[in-house]
Amino acid sequence: MEHGKKGKTVQDLRPRSKVTSADKLLNLLMVFAHKSEARSVETLAQELDLPHSTAYRYVKTLSDAGLIVAVSAGSYILGPSIIVLDRQMRLSDPLLNSAEHVKTRLAEELPGPGTVLVCRLFRNSVMCVDSAGSGNLEFVVSYARGRSLPLYRGAGKVILAHMPLRNVRTFFDADSAQFKSAGLGADWKTVRTSLRKIRQQGFSITHGEIDKGALGISSPVLGHDGQVIGSLAYVTHERTTDQKTTDSICAAIMQGAQEVERNLAQMLLEAASDTRQAKKGQTPNS
């Protein structure tokens, strides 16, 4: 997520005909996602260009729901309801559940030390939603759970390669310099060729794009409709990983991503079956 002019939060590129009160309330909550320090009502009002009375009303609503909590007079941080929602997401998210055993097994089996990342397409970015590691890397994997990054970096590249080209073109036209710096190309034709190569080989390899000295290998996770929903990735030492080892990791990550897809399809199939059975059990008057 990025910041626009006057500190306003830019959630995505989709146009809105009208910004509603609900939009403004959620924008205020999302301000807390960018920095860890407490925020005063006055600061929030200034950042979002809101009247103080409106900011106070929104803060009270979020505070009553436990989504933010006061840590001192007039200063707020994220509240305990966020933890409740996080726990429920871990329990109910089909992607997380489908990848649980896969990421744990790969973390144990792949040449270490390293970290397996489960990533999800999130608006116009890629977010790490889970991970499992083995051994001690010489560097901290900064791409930790809850952090989102641009699609043209790291584990996002393989997602970008499986998105509709019209969507990718929109991102490219908005910030072509970033595509060039990420090694995808300085012009649209080159970018398209680079992404086609990634899509055809089924994986993406990056070198130190997020953390210095890191080798990142990622493969897409597709939904039942063929649309990309995320990626499975592995981060390890670049210096100590030879080509043969890299090739074996690529193969394992691709197989792991396909296993996540099968688990996800089975999970959704069972959920649909349960729904049909529940409807059959309903009486006409229920």
Image (cartoon, grey):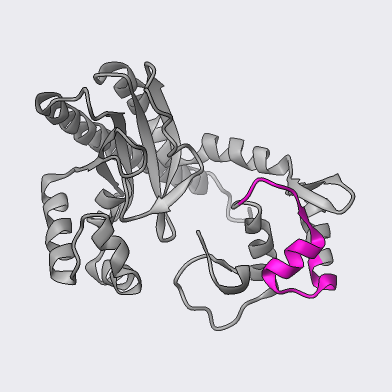
**Viewer-closest of 84 and 132:** 132
Number of numbered discs overlaid on the protein picture: 0
Span shown in magenta: 35-55
x and y percent of residue 127 in the render? 43, 47
Q: Is residue 168 above or below residue 131?
A: below
**Viewer-closest of 208 and 258:** 208
> Is 48 one of the magenta-colored residues?
yes
Residue 163 showing in the rendered view: no
> Is 171 one of the magenta-colored residues?
no
User: Horizontally, is 280 left or right of 6 in the view?
Assistant: left
**Viewer-closest of 152 and 62:** 152
**Viewer-closest of 210 and 155:** 210
The quadrant where residue 140 appears: top left
**Residue ID at (16%, 44%):** 202
x and y percent of residue 60 in the render? 83, 58
User: Horizontally, is 93 left or right of 196 in the view?
Assistant: right
**Residue ID at (78%, 50%):** 76
The quadrant where residue 167 appears: bottom left
**Residue ID at (31%, 62%):** 178
